[in-house]
Amino acid sequence: MFVLFLLFPLVSAFDYSIILEEKSPINQAIYHFPYSYELLTNFQSNFNLTNNNRDLILTKTIDRDAWCAQNICSCDHCSFLLELFSNDNKTVPIFSSINITITDLNDHACQFLDIQTNISLSESIQIGHRFPIARAIDADSGVNGQLSFKLLENEDYFELNIINLSVNEYAIYGILKHALDRELEEQYDLLIEAVDHGLKQVRSSRMNVTVWILDENDNAPKFNQTEYSIQSLPEDTPVGTQLLTISATDIDKGLNSLIHYSIVQPPGISSFPFAIDSNTGVVSLRSSLDYETVRSYRFLIRASDSGLPQSLYTDTWLSISIADVNDCPVEITFIPNRRFQYENQTLFIYENTEIKNLTIGYIRLFDQDSIPTKLSVSLMTLDSKLQQEYELIPSSQINSYILIAKKGIYDREIQREVHLRFVATDTLLTSISDITIHLLDLNDNPSEFPSNPMKFSIEELANYHMVEHPTENSQIVLGYLNATDPDEGENAMNRYELEPNSYVKIDSNTGRLTLIQPLDREQISRIQLKAKAINIAEPKWETEVQVEIEVLDINDNIPQCLSRIQQISVRENSSTTNSLVQINATDVDLGVNGTINYSIRLNSSWPFEINSKTGEIYSRQIFDYESNSKTFFIIVDLEDEGFPIKNQNKNACQLIVNIEDINDNSPQLTDDSQTRIFLDLQRSPFLNEIILFNATDLDSGDNGKVKYSLLDNDSNSLFRLYPNGSLHMTRQINQVSLFKLEILLEDYGIPTQQARISVIVAIGDTNIPAFSTFEKVLVKYSQPKSIGLILGLTVLIITLLLFLCIIVTCILLRQHRRRHQAAIIARKKLLCSSSQQLTSSGSTNTTSSFSVEHQQIANIVQIKPIYYNRRTSDTYTMNTSSPESQTYKILHIPQDNEYYLNYYHHEKVDNHSSDLGYHGSYETGSSSSPSSQMSTRHSHMVNQLPDFVTKCKSVNGGFLVEMNVDGSDEDRR
């Protein structure tokens, strides 16, 4: 919402004035008003209102002289205005002002400044010489600040020269009346007395200075003006601006005439805004000006020479008046409706206050600038969602407005604060003032719980050590029934009630729920109760809620095996992918407290592992009855995942695993040397047992029993093998021999396991060295077979190499034939278009062939020799080549240009690369006269020149091609 008004100057209906002496007593009434007022402005915070805001009093002592020194008010006439506001008239507020004038009190004596305590004069100085002594000032104003001076000693030699610098400030100079002689008198004491002109009381001061007589600088600098001034210096003058140049001269010479400038800074001013260049005398601005703080400056400029031993100086006044610019924004003052409390820019209003053109307060505008300007003000709301509508309406008083709320509601629970902004402007500068309307609470809302039902949880008390009758300190806190109330303060306070029960009780003030007896989740897992929150303030709102308490599980039960001892049998060679057995156990706790982890207590070499989650036991390797233990005793530990863990070693499950044998091993000879038997003919006959085979089977029982049998072969009639492994010969043999026997070893298992072994029986003679051992007999009978194998392999390799050479030769020949055929085809394509055959007789025959399809003409000329008759323009050719080899030039020329044909006979044939292609006829023979060759031309385009084309030349408008055709061509033309 935005409202804009323009304010025009009006005449105030109520004005007051008072004349007050400085340093009047404080806390005493200095003026009595007919109405009750409030101070809108308080000059220097020196005033206040008492006696029902009708009496104006001083709160601090006023020092007019200090204000004058600080330019707070004018020294000549010190007065100011206080802005007042009255609401006694219930309809329209009254804005007034009082003018207060402060008069001077003669409370200051003369004060000497810049005292020259050590004055030195040359004895040769002339009579009438003036020298500075000091400055004198009286802080009082008017006649109280006017001074008279008198020299009390040595008035025969000196007299005083007084220069009035201002109303109450003087420069004291001494003038020499009598010639000086240092040898007679080296020093003079000057006692000076200053007396003010006070009417009620006279104040005086004295000062003593000493004048030393020296042997000379006898001229002080002189300004070119007696006083300098700058009128109406704008207060917004930029810092650093050069304002004025002060100039002084000294008639002395050398250092005595070298002048330096300085400012004698007025007393009581902490921040002086001006500076002077000591060499040039340029006065500049060193800090910003403020017309509203100080309106004028008056200070001394001092010019000093550099004379020795005594520097002389002269002072002059510089007065600067400050001109006001519009640099002060409009001051916005908010005066609240007395119905409402107002503090620190915040207005306090009770919610539910009726809104119907409700007066919120009053707005007063004030501009400190002296330049008359038009004022305007606007109202803005800073809240996005506002529940009220506000408006500023003009008041009958000058620069005042009334702030009203036109319509809407005040509900603190919807909007706790309203933020308003006043924007005022004087057509150039803008100022902003914010106020906040804070809504005070009323108990107009019942309490609310965060949820319904209110849910709490508590662990079962197996791990809480509650005694049978618990004390207050040992009670377990479940939580709090924390009902919230949109209201605040006492209106939001509640007391709580809970229905009677034997488990939980409630603190009526805090809503704290405490447990009064242990709970066991395995017996009761949930408690449901009713509770309510009751407002303390009227009206006592009640809010009911359902309370649900969930008993949480703790790990207070240990896992239990369903079967303490289990016994299983596992066949060897069983697969490791399937579990051997699953251990079953239970835990009555919930969640992780009831989740069981299984582990095995076993020897690290045992081939077992367990699924820690399911309790399934697996074998890490396939069992072998023959190599492993036959029985395993396994202890399975149970533990849950709760905290603390229950229980690792107690109540473990026991498992007995028995390994069953299967027939998985075949019989094997225990001694491999039994497969090599040597019989010596010197010990024949061999009628008894030759050897008793010894075979074993790692299986047990029938699976491990072995029987022997001899497989059929040519030696069966000579040998007999008994089931117990005993080998015998059936007849006698008297010559060196070698026999190979195949023996079957078989167990009695189901199914049976078999093994075949080869046994070599060598019959030798120890008396014959070549057959005296088993190895020699074996070598004798196995050598021929090895030689035959080597020869067979050699023949096979040679045959394969010969076959490979034949294949490679055929491939190369076929490729050569294809290349030859491709060359012949290319030549045919070049020559097949011509219908004129070239003969080997050497005569020149001229033929013309007309092609209906191409409508072209070709000119054929043989290379050597060529004869050309210039007179008759006849051309003819002689054949000098052999019948087997002919070289031809084929010339392709334009149809209607005989010049090219004549030109050809004089041109030398150049070599050209074959990738240029060529155009030409394929007719062969000698060239005829040009006139006989004028017919339709026949040309072809060839992408790649054949091998027999040797030269190619481009002639303007045509091509000249040379080719060689030998007698090997099949279709020679």
Image (spheres, grey):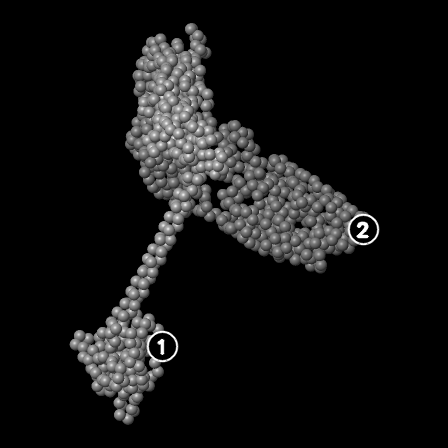
Residue 858 occupies quadrant: bottom left
Please report whichever mark, 1 or 2, sits nearer to the chain's N-terminal start.
Answer: 2
Q: Is residue 85 above or below residue 606?
A: below
- For residue 924, what is the image quadrant? bottom left
Secondary structure of the residue carrying tag 2 is loop
Most extreme residue toward the left is 852
Q: Residue at the spot x=27%, y=70% of the render?
A: 824
Residue 680 has which mark? Answer: none
Secondary element at tag 1? loop
146 or 111: nearer the eye? 111
Residue under circle 2? 182
Instruction: In this rendered view, identify the residue nearer to me: 137 or 278.
Output: 278
Res. 32 visible in picture: no
**Residue 175 vertical position relative to residue 48 in the rendered view, above or below:** below
Q: Which residue is mark 1?
A: 911
Q: Position of residue 932 (x, y in %)?
A: 21, 86
Q: Quadrant of residue 789?
A: top left
Residue 77 in the image, given as x and y percentages of width and height? 53, 41
Count residues near mark 1 (Cα–Cα under 10 Å), then give few for <14, some for 14-19, many for 20+: few
Q: Amino acid at mark 2?
A: Arg
Q: Residue at x 34, y 14 (%)?
A: 525
Residue at 28% over, 93% down: 871
Q: Nearer the viewer, residue 251 or 596?
A: 596
Q: Amino acid at mark 1?
A: Asn
Residue 878 in sight here: yes
Of all residues, the one furthest to the bottom in this rendering is 871
Name above or below for residue 945 compared with residue 135: below
Which of the two discs, 1 and 2, sits closer to the camera?
Answer: 1
- Circles 1, 2 touching at the beta carbon (< 8 Å): no
Q: Quadrant of the N terminus?
A: top left
